[in-house]
Amino acid sequence: MIEIIDLTKQYGKFTALDCLNLTIDKGTVFGFVGQNGAGKSTTFSILATLLSPSSGTAYINGFNIRSEPKAVRSQIGYMPDFFGVYDQLKTVEYLDFYGASYGISQSERNKLIPQLLELVNLTDKQDSYVDILSRGMKQRLCLARSLIHDPEVLILDEPASGLDPRARVEMREILKELKNMGKTILISSHILPELAEMCDTIGIIDQGRLVAQGSVSEIQQRLKGEKLIVVKLQHGLDEAVRFFEDQPMVSGLVKREDGHSLQFIYSGDAEDQVQLLKMALLQNLAIVSFSEIETNLEDVFMEITKGVELT
Amino acid sequence: MRNLLLNPVLNKEFKLRFRSFKSFLGLGLYLLALSVLMVGFIFLESQGSPMGRFRPEQSRTMFILMSFIQMGLILFITPGLTAGVISGEREKQTLNILLTTNQSSASIIFGKLISSVSFLLLMIFASMPIYSIVFLYGGISPGQVLVVLGYYIFTILVFGSIGIFFSTLVRKTIIAMITTYGVTLFLTAGTAFLFAVSMSVSQMGNSSNNPFALFFVMLNPVMILFSFLEPDAFSELSNQLGLGSEFPLWAANMVTYVLIMVLLIFISVKKLRPNMKVKSRR
Ligand SMILES: Nc1ncnc2c1ncn2[C@@H]1O[C@H](COP(=O)(O)OP(=O)(O)OP(=O)(O)O)[C@@H](O)[C@H]1O
Ligand SMILES: [Mg+2]
């Protein structure tokens, strides 16, 4: 079980994480979604005791990350978004080293390592040097490493990034297996569909703030009530942006690439929409068109997180 | 203590280091160079002497020469071996993972310090048999050889901890290296220079008591090594400086160095992981 309370991280004046509150129940999989720079890795680094928060705190299985970081470390298996491996070390030795670092006895390690390699399908690579493994293999090896002390909580920062579609499927299978083993898993991604299938709950983070949270079906429900509206202007785009930004029920407003239109997510009904357009015209905005775009879950999500990556 | 010996970092680095053939090739070449140097020295000296023999005084000179060469080597190599060990892991992005394990910061720092200088220690130990050729010709006592050896190990650990310190505090290896070499240069050439300056200043003032000069000598590992090798000449110097020999300089040096080392290692251990309690406004 993970409890995040008012977690804030500032880099100088820049607020990377703004008063984050979250509770993740034991044995569930929580998907943390957000665009690049949203603050996912920052959150995970703090939970892994690698970064000190500016304020707020978090509890992992009841241990405070601030006052009991050592206990927290034995509770979690952490996989960073970017990581390196030692060269000149073989796969088995690599796992053995980290096993020893967790104080696991040699005999225990000898039993454990083949099981872990089996779990991540690397048995045939046990005598290869780790630095020549492919990226997907390294990623799986890193996952095996994070499991070596049998942690109850897994904190996985984009474990599938940089993998080809097949490797993604493989990674997902492994994660499902881990879920079945009863682990609490915290996993991040910029891509919602990738997570939707296997997560019990999802949190969407944007600019350091949690903008939506709930079960996958809840979020889907919520997003269904929203539509994407595109407004094309003849001129005065910035003015229009300022106007629409301040309107109720408008979120995720961005300028489109063509340079004279903008789009936003609108959660009001048809009546509200009529009013909105009227107001806009009263402002003398040079609106050429005002149209609603058919959306599906993915599109709306992409708007919320303003993500660009689809693959 | 047991914990330090069962140190996973130490274990792993030993395995890596002593597995590679290159390491042993390097060691072999070093010993060969040292032997050639010694044999050459003996050959030249005995050629020049009237009876064609190698006399104890010459053997002594050779030992002192070798000791300075090895000391120079130590001071030159130790920063390079140590200043990259923590920052290097940070740059290779392996440090984060290591820091999320249960291993204590102290154990990581010690493991890194010992393993990074282990090969240098091995080089020094392995050169000892060659060194002891001087026993054949006399002029030096086994005790002196041991003292020199002990001071080598001490110097390696002290300057190694300087390297580890900067490696932990500074993000970039290259900057950690430069800083460590800078400090090492200051403690050797720098203090020697300041010693010379304060000597010439005091000669002008015509005072025999010169605490500054003494202080700079005390900080300089090469001078201290010299005091072990030529105690008579050295006590004459410290008499001139007006301190007599109530408190030997080498003792002052070792106390100072131990304090520096303990402080630097302590800070490194504290700074390796972030202080999670800091900046709490709640
Ligand atoms: N050491 C640092 N100093 C200053 N700013 C930082 C630092 N680390 C991260 N940031 C900023 O904090 C914000 C959050 O970064 P973070 O790495 O948590 O994003 P993320 O959600 O993981 O993004 P991505 O999907 O690209 O991995 C970014 O705007 C980043 O520029
Ligand atoms: Mg990230």
Image: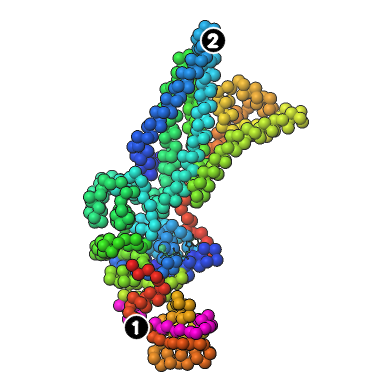
Q: Is residue B172 visible?
A: yes
Residue A80 percent location from the top left of the image: 38, 58
> Looking at the image, which residue is at 46% across and 89% down?
A276
> Looking at the image, which residue is at 34% across and 43% down?
A88
- The image shows residue B142, relative to residue A308, as above or below, that is above
Residue nearest the viewer, comparing A302 with A71 = A302
Tally of numbered tags: 2
- The image shows residue A205, relative to residue B229, as above or below, that is below
Say the numbered circle drawn on residue B215: none
Is A260 colored magenta in this rendering?
A: no
Name the residue that disc number 1 marks.
Answer: A294
Q: Amino acid at mark 1?
A: Glu
Q: Amino acid at mark 2?
A: Ser
Residue B243 percent location from the top left of the image: 67, 28
> Looking at the image, which residue is at 63% across and 26% down?
B245
- Badge 1 element: loop
What residue span does the magenta drawing correspond to? A217-241
The chain holding disc 2 is B
Do badges 2 and 1 share one subunit?
no
Is A311 displayed left or right of A230 in the figure? left
Q: CA distance from mark 2 to mark 1?
A: 103 Å
Name the residue that disc number 2 marks.
Answer: B49
Residue nearest the viewer, comparing B19 with B46 = B46
Is A244 displayed left or right of B17 in the figure? right
- Badge 2 element: loop
Residue A170 percent location from the top left of the image: 25, 61
Q: Nearer the viewer, mark 2 or mark 1?
A: 1
Question: Badge 2: how crowded within 10 Å, few (<14), some, or many (20+)?
Answer: few
Q: Is residue A71 visible?
A: no
Residue A12 percent location from the top left of the image: 54, 63
